[in-house]
Image (spheres, helix red, strand yellow):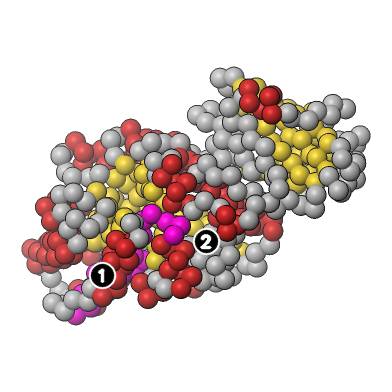
């Protein structure tokens, strides 16, 4: 049995080496996410509800995030419930809060099939009438906030899952030109705002994201003002698409920015420590994918607390989808975001035995890694170490442990001869794995 402690000089030799799980740090001392993001040249945002922006909710929204997206306040049904009668109260409140906290605002959303006012959806309109209603709506709303909105989700959710255009009041009445026209009208009303098309289930490379890709490409070729794509990222626990970073990169390569606009990771309730650890890994890998691509400019969570999430009411039995619990305590997911942004927060160790993952050598297609399990003030008679790869890495061989990999999830259990880790000692196992694109260090948990 090889038992090797990873000393700092060795660690310093290799990029990507992380020693995790040292002493737990006080949460209160953690660097705010917005400062970590700024150090990476990124913006970190959250969707908010205007009426809640006081007390702890307000402190966290203002202190941790550098961008706010009104969850509902800027939707057509909210701002013009009766034709010609406008209600900007909540939208104004959120914009003012953002300005007071030196935050960007992502405007959400101008053209959508949902949350439209009844007078609009129940009306009978000619194509010309519909076009001028849409143009007026865009000009009015974008014009009102001219110079105050960093980015607009101009068009929301235009595609079906198979990549065909969604049948909506806009597509049915105006044809696919509504998209180019909406962008053009928005640009006229605020030339400085970045203009996005935003959709869900477009995080990985698939038929829907490819349709979005082709649309953006053709809009760019036609000179239509399109600045970015929003990948909503309403994800299910353990199901971060393996092609997320690749997909972000292909949009970036078209010459547009990318934002993760509505990130959440839902789980079957009740939550437990295993699910929360997986959720941490999921948040971390999404944020890491954005950090890895320079044109990925913003990661926004769709509500930062489990008390302010759309998930529970929409998916009965699912929830706990955000980085803070309902009492505003940061969950492991919060630390996953922080770590992906280069923060050094730690997860409380399991007992007093800890696991540290390190890449000890790396070449163009593969790498050798090792994990050291150390005990201090405690001991083990068997062990299992789990992690989730964020960038498609695949274990090919392991020694001094039995490792299995299913999708991105890796689980390594002790060999027959090294399950015992005495107080004050350590056990190391090693593995070879393949990688392409990037090789981020995963968070490991000791079970
Ligand atoms: O559905 C999740 C998101 C998907 N992408 C576009 C986003 O705009 C969308 O956000 C959600 C809001 O978070 C929910 O809060 O959009 C929902 C509507 O599709 C919002 O739900 C609505 C409820 O359906 C209404 O009953 C409620 O009055 O929120 C309204 C305000 O609380």
Q: Is mark 1 within 8 Å of ligand 1?
A: no
Q: Does residue 37 appear left or right of residue 251 in this picture?
A: right
Identify the disc placed on residue 422. none
* Residue 167 showing in the rendered view: no
**Which percent across, then down, holds residue 314?**
48, 70
Q: Residue at x 23, y 65 (%)?
A: 169
Q: Quadrant of the N terminus?
A: top right
**Residue where numbered disc 2 is placed:** 322
Q: Does residue 325 appear left or right of residue 416 in this picture?
A: left
* Residue 80 showing in the rendered view: yes
Residue 5: image quadrant is top right
Q: What distance separates the C-alpha of mark 1 from that of mark 2? A: 25 Å
Residue 319: image quadrant is bottom right
**Which percent across, then down, holds residue 261?**
39, 54
> Is 322 drawn above or below residue 41 in the view shown?
below
Element type at mark 1: helix
**Residue where numbered disc 1 is placed:** 92
**387 or 63, nearer to the observer:** 63
What's the magenta region? Answer: 63-82
């Amino acid at each position: 049995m090889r038992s090797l402690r990873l000393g700092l000089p060795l660690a310093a030799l290799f990029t990507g080496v992380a020693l995790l799980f040292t002493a737990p740090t006080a949460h209160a001392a953690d660097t705010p996410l917005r400062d970590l993001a700024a150090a990476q040249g990124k913006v970190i945002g959250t969707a908010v509800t205007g009426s809640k922006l006081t007390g702890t909710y307000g402190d966290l929204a203002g202190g941790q995030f550098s961008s706010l997206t009104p969850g509902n306040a800027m939707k057509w049904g909210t701002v013009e419930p009766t034709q010609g009668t406008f209600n900007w109260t909540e939208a104004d409140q959120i914009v003012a809060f953002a300005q007071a906290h030196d935050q960007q605002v992502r405007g959400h959303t101008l053209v959508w099939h949902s949350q439209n006012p009844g007078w609009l959806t129940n009306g009978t309109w000619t194509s010309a009438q519909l076009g001028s209603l849409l143009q007026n709506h865009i000009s009015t709303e974008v014009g009102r906030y001219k110079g105050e909105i960093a980015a607009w989700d101009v068009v929301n959710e235009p595609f079906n899952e198979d990549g065909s255009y969604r049948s909506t009041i806009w597509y049915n009445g105006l044809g696919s030109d509504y998209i180019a026209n909406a962008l053009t009208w928005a640009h006229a009303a605020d030339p400085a705002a970045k203009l996005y098309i935003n959709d869900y289930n477009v995080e990985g490379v698939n038929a829907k994201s490819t349709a979005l890709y082709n649309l953006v490409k053709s809009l760019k070729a036609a000179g239509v003002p399109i600045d970015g794509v929003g990948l909503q990222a309403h994800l299910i626990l353990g199901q971060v698409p393996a092609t997320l970073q690749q997909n972000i990169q292909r949009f970036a390569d078209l010459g547009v920015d990318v934002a993760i606009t509505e990130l959440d990771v839902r789980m079957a309730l009740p939550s437990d420590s295993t699910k929360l650890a997986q959720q941490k890994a999921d948040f971390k890998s999404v944020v890491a994918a954005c950090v890895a691509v320079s044109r990925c400019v913003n990661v926004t969570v769709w509500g930062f607390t489990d008390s302010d999430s759309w998930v529970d009411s929409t998916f009965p039995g699912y929830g706990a989808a955000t980085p803070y619990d309902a009492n505003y305590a940061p969950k492991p997911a919060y630390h996953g975001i922080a770590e992906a942004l280069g923060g050094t927060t730690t997860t409380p160790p399991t007992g007093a035995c800890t696991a540290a993952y390190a890449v000890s050598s790396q070449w163009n297609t593969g790498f050798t890694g090792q994990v050291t399990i150390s005990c201090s003030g405690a001991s083990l008679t068997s062990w299992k170490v789990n992690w989730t790869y964020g960038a498609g890495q695949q274990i090919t061989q392991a020694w001094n442990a039995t490792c299995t990999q299913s999708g991105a999830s890796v689980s390594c259990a002790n060999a027959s001869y090294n399950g015992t880790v005495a107080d004050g000692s350590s056990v190391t196992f090693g593995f070879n794995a393949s990688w392409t694109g990037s090789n981020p260090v995963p968070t490991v948990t000791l079970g």
